[in-house]
Amino acid sequence: MITITQEEIEQLREIFIDNRRAKDTIKILEGCSGNINEAMNIIISIEKDEYTLGDKDWIDFKNILKDLHKVLCSKTGEQLTTNCFPASLALLSSKLGYPDPVLVLGLACVLKIGVENFCNSE
């Protein structure tokens, strides 16, 4: 279980200041006292009404983080900083097929762990 502090939630708000869906996701995360797993369960229940899940097993948060690792920690991801997170959403969404709220929670984990630590974790 990964828990984001109130300070990290505020940092996410600053990072995604111009993204309404991200801000809605951050509100849900804050309502879950920063518990990313709990917030993910809520997001999944909302998103599966809006998206066809098909064969994609994106409900497993570990798989989401593995997919993020593949993209963010590749050669192109070496320059990634939290300032790049807003621009990364469109790229990640197109490459991985996850909706923005799911990716925001994944990026919240990356923020918590730190980009360098996240990329060195596998």
Image (cartoon, rainbow, N blue to C red):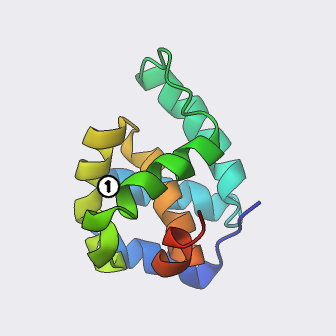
> Relative to the observer, which residue lies in front, 63 or 39?
63
100 relative to 8, above or below: above
- Residue 31: which quarter of the image? bottom right
Q: Nearer the viewer, residue 14 or 57?
A: 57
Q: Residue at image x 53%, y 45%? A: 64
Tell me, yes or no, if residue 5 can be seen here: yes
Depicted 87 relative to depicted 11: above or below: above
Locate the N terminus and report the quarter of the image it occupies. bottom right
Q: Quadrant of residue 96?
A: top left
Task: Pinpoint residue 98: horizontal percent, then vertical percent.
Answer: 40, 38
Question: Where is mark 1, residue-wise?
Answer: 20
**Residue 113: x and y, percent?**
59, 75
Q: Position of residue 99 (x, y in %)?
A: 39, 39
Name the element at disc 1.
helix
Name the residue at 22% across, 62% down.
Answer: 87
Q: Which of the 4 image quarters holds residue 22?
A: bottom left
The residue sitting at 27% across, 72% down in the picture is 84
Query: The disc labelled 1 sits on which kind of residue?
Result: Arg
Q: Quadrant of the C terminus?
A: bottom right
- Local crowd size for mark 1, using a 10 Å CA cut-off: few (<14), some (14–19), many (≥20): few
Q: Residue at x 62, y 45 (%)?
A: 61
User: What number of labels is visible?
Assistant: 1
Task: Name the foreground residue: 60 vs 101.
Answer: 60
